[in-house]
């Protein structure tokens, strides 16, 4: 099952009807089973709305002024091509600042979870409007009945207006949904999800359809629970047709989809993990962001997709959902090949590139996910590697999820070490078995607007005796210290490249 979900950006940039048609035609080349585009973010609707606030100050205004409904036209073209359409509703989107609040949001400021600072706080990059801070935003408290009713009114309008196949509730952008204590208020969100399900059932009965209700959710079940999302209750009550757990800012090869498969076991709810289309920030080579890159790792290409899909299938998922895989960016290059890329029978005959550069900690905002300004949330572990080794005898362990059954084949395993001294000795083990270095090559990296530095690439051929399907524990130990080295060795960017099988 192939699903694609994108935000509204491509459609909002259309000022002529022909652009809408071309966007739909390009989208159809994906052959997606289900296509989802944002139809509303909180109170802002990307169609002529009386239940919410119609989006304005975009190129699409020209089409609306001419009497067009670009969203409706786009849906119609996809439906004609046999693609099911499940519009996306961002339940409590965090984009925006107090100056961007709608009139309804301003009128009911007391229901907002935001803080009207109107100023930068800890993120001070020139030009930033402060929306990356949790709390500076338009988000509303779902414990307030009027908030739930306003959101439900918008969803009811969308469902009545368009020939859709269901709705998706997007909880990824983002928490918070409640004031503290958040966990104890989960019944309010369950009431909201239940009301949406009831509305779709009633409409579906009139139309002779079984309308789907989906939820895109943070990949960390415990995080969801703490934020007041009782997803187990939604599944047990039969409210959801499918779930899309994922990470909203960068792909992560270590996400535990098997936990979601177990949560949905015995129900009719399917699990389609959400793969983000960004590997890492394109300028993350700067020292402050802690990810060196320099080798094009930001490119979301077929080898990375094959690895991500292979790992997801090894955990028992039912299909794959791509998030923000925009037609404008990826349509010509990837859309015609997506069905092949997610075909489990074809994956062994492809090259797979596993790339681990993050730690499995769900970061709720772009402020934290981008590692800005210092790469970690106060009191939390860093979201990005590297690990540091200072003195002889120090070591760390890092778990990696791997989806390839290597059999008699071998995979190329490598990682980077920044500031490794010539006299440093490194020992590496995978699942308790020592790996010998086939090579240790030194390179220079010249980041933009930052000093040049040297790094080493440690490489080894690894087989099934070391790497297994599922969780693997990597241990790196500094066996000997270079007395001339004055800074810690930074270790990160772990990669596994799997070649196509002969069969």
Image (cartoon, grey):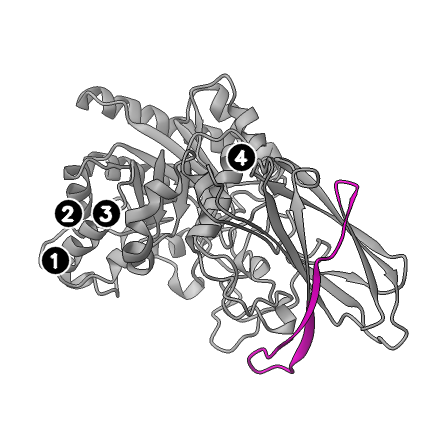
**Residue mark closest to the camera, 1 vs 3:** 3
372 lies above or below 301: below
- Residue beneath the point at 60% across and 37% down: 408
**Residue mark closest to the camera, 4 vs 1:** 1
Any mark on residue 17, and which? 1
Real-space CA distance between mark 3 and mark 2, rounded to the nearest whole angstrom: 17 Å
Q: SS at mark 1?
A: helix
Badge 4 crowding class, 10 Å Cα cut-off, few under 14, some 14 to 19, many 20 or more, is many
Real-space CA distance between mark 1 and mark 3, rounded to the nearest whole angstrom: 19 Å
On the image, numbered disc 4 is attached to which residue?
A: 229
Sequence-first disc among 1 and 2 = 1
Q: Are marks 3 and 4 in contact (CB under 8 Å)?
A: no
Q: SS at mark 3?
A: loop
Badge 1 crowding class, 10 Å Cα cut-off, few under 14, some 14 to 19, many 20 or more, is some
395 lies above or below 172: below
- Residue beneath the point at 87% across and 71% down: 482
Bounds of the magenta segment: 430-456
On the image, numbered disc 2 is attached to which residue?
A: 73
Relative to 200, is 119 on the left or the right?
Answer: right
Please indicate, yes or no, whether residue 140 appears anywhere in the rendered image. no
Q: SS at mark 2?
A: helix
Q: Are marks 1 and 3 in contact (CB under 8 Å)?
A: no
Q: Nearer the viewer, residue 183 or 268?
A: 268
Please indicate, yes or no, whether residue 317 appears anywhere in the rendered image. yes
Sequence-first disc among 4 and 2 = 2
On the image, numbered disc 3 is attached to which residue?
A: 29
């Amino acid at each position: 099952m192939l699903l694609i979900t994108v935000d509204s950006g491509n459609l909002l940039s259309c000022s002529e009807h022909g652009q809408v048609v071309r966007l739909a035609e390009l989208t159809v080349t994906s052959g997606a089973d289900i296509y989802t585009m944002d139809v509303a973010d909180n109170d802002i609707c990307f169609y002529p709305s009386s239940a919410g606030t119609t989006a304005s100050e975009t190129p699409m205004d020209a089409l609306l002024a001419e009497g067009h409904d670009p969203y409706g036209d786009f849906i119609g073209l996809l439906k004609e091509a046999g693609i099911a359409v499940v519009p996306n509703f961002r339940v409590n989107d965090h984009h925006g600042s107090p100056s961007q609040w709608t009139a309804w949001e301003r009128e009911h400021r007391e229901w907002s979870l935001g803080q009207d600072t109107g100023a930068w706080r800890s993120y001070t990059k020139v030009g930033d409007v402060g929306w990356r801070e949790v709390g500076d935003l338009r988000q509303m408290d779902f414990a307030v009945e009027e908030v739930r009713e306003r959101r439900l009114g918008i969803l009811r309008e969308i469902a009545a207006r368009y020939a859709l196949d269901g709705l998706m509730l997007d909880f990824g952008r983002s928490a918070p949904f409640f004031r503290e204590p958040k966990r104890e208020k989960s019944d309010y969100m369950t009431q909201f999800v239940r009301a949406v399900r009831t509305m779709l059932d009633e409409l579906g009965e009139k139309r002779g359809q079984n309308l789907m209700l989906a939820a895109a959710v943070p990949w960390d079940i415990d995080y969801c629970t703490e934020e007041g999302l009782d997803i187990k209750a939604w599944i047990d009550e039969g409210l959801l047709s499918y779930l899309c757990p994922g990470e909203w800012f960068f792909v992560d090869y270590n996400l535990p989809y098997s936990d979601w498969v177990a949560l949905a076991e015995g129900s009719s709810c399917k699990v389609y993990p959400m793969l983000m289309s960004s590997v890492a920030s394109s300028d993350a080579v700067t020292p402050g962001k802690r990810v060196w890159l320099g080798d094009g790792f930001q490119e979301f290409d077929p080898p990375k997709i094959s690895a991500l899909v292979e790992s997801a299938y090894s955990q028992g998922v039912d299909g794959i959902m791509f998030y923000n895989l925009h037609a404008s960016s990826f349509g010509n290059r990837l859309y015609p090949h997506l069905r092949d890329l997610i075909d489990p029978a074809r994956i062994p005959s492809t090259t797979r590139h596993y790339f681990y550069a993050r730690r499995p900690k769900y970061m709720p905002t772009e402020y934290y996910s981008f590692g800005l300004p210092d790469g970690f949330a106060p009191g939390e572990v860093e979201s990005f590697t590297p690990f540091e080794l200072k003195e002889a005898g120090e070591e760390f362990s890092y778990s990696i999820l791997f989806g390839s059954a290597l059999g008699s084949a071998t995979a190329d395993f490598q990682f980077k070490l920044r500031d490794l001294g010539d006299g440093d000795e490194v020992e590496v083990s995978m699942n308790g078995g020592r790996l010998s270095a086939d090579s240790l090559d030194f390179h220079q990296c010249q980041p933009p607007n930052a000093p040049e530095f040297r790094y080493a690439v440690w490489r080894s051929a690894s087989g099934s005796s070391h790497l297994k399907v599922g969780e693997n524990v990597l241990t790196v130990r500094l066996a000997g210290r270079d007395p001339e080295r004055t800074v810690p060795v930074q270790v990160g960017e772990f990669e596994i490249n799997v070649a196509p099988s002969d069969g």
